[in-house]
Image (cartoon, helix red, strand yellow):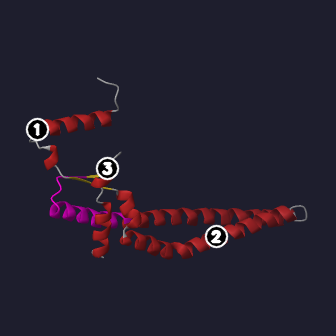
């Protein structure tokens, strides 16, 4: 066995099997297209709108986190500046206040990141579903035999990404 990663080896075996079993097709009869998924997720109107909506939805929480971060920084600077003149009990109280606020900030920041990630994933899944439907419609209407996504290399003449983006624009 060659020293090839198992995934690559499996892909090569599957490809060879398909080619050996599939009926012979002349290269000139085969119509292949390519779609750049990342470009669709970046340029499709639904993707652009989803990004704006998510930014708007989460901007309030982001501003709240920024205010908390500034408050934490102010508390820390105040403690450092007045450490020499503070009584022991006052210093402990400030340290406790700082520690409590730090924990609350970290909790809110973690929740923010999780909620943002979940919302972005939901939006991307919805856009991907719409894009896949548009790709299928284009493939059927233009009689493509094969449409590839995320290839290592492709000829620009095979790229139908803009057709998909346009179909998504038209199908708002």
- Give the spatial CA distance, label 2 vs label 3: 46 Å
Is residue 132 visible in the rendered structure shown here? yes
Q: Position of residue 123 (x, y in %)?
A: 38, 67
SS at mark 1? helix
Residue hosting label 3: 155
Q: Position of residue 119 (x, y in %)?
A: 42, 67
For the magenta stretch, what is the residue range?
124-147
- Choose top left, top right, bottom left or bottom right for residue 171: bottom left
- Give the spatial CA distance, label 1 vs label 3: 27 Å
At x 90%, y 61%, the residue is 84
Where is the N terminus found, in terms of image quarters? top left
Which of the pair 155/131 is nearer the observer? 155
SS at mark 2? helix
Label for residue 66?
2
The numbered mark, 2 or 3, whose residue comes first in the sequence reads 2
30 is higher (above) or lower (below) than 107:
above
Whether the magenta-drawn stretch holds residue 24 is answered as no
Is residue 34 visible in the rendered structure shown here? no
Residue hosting label 1: 21
């Amino acid at each position: 066995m060659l020293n090839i990663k198992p995934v690559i080896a499996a892909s090569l075996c599957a490809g060879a099997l398909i080619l050996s079993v599939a009926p012979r097709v002349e290269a000139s009869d085969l119509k292949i297209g390519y779609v750049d998924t990342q470009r669709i997720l970046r340029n499709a109107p639904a993707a652009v709108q989803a990004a704006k909506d998510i930014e708007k939805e989460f901007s309030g929480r982001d501003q709240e986190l920024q205010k908390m971060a500034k408050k934490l920084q102010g508390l820390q600077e105040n403690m450092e500046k007045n450490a020499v003149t503070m009584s022991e009990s006052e210093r402990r109280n400030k340290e406790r206040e700082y520690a409590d606020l730090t924990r609350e900030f970290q909790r809110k920041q973690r929740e923010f990141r999780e909620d943002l990630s979940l919302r972005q994933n939901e939006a991307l899944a919805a856009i991907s579903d719409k894009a896949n439907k548009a790709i299928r419609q284009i493939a059927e209407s233009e009689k493509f035999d094969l449409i590839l996504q995320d290839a290592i290399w492709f000829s620009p003449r095979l790229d139908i990404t803009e057709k998909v983006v346009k179909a998504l624009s038209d199908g708002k």
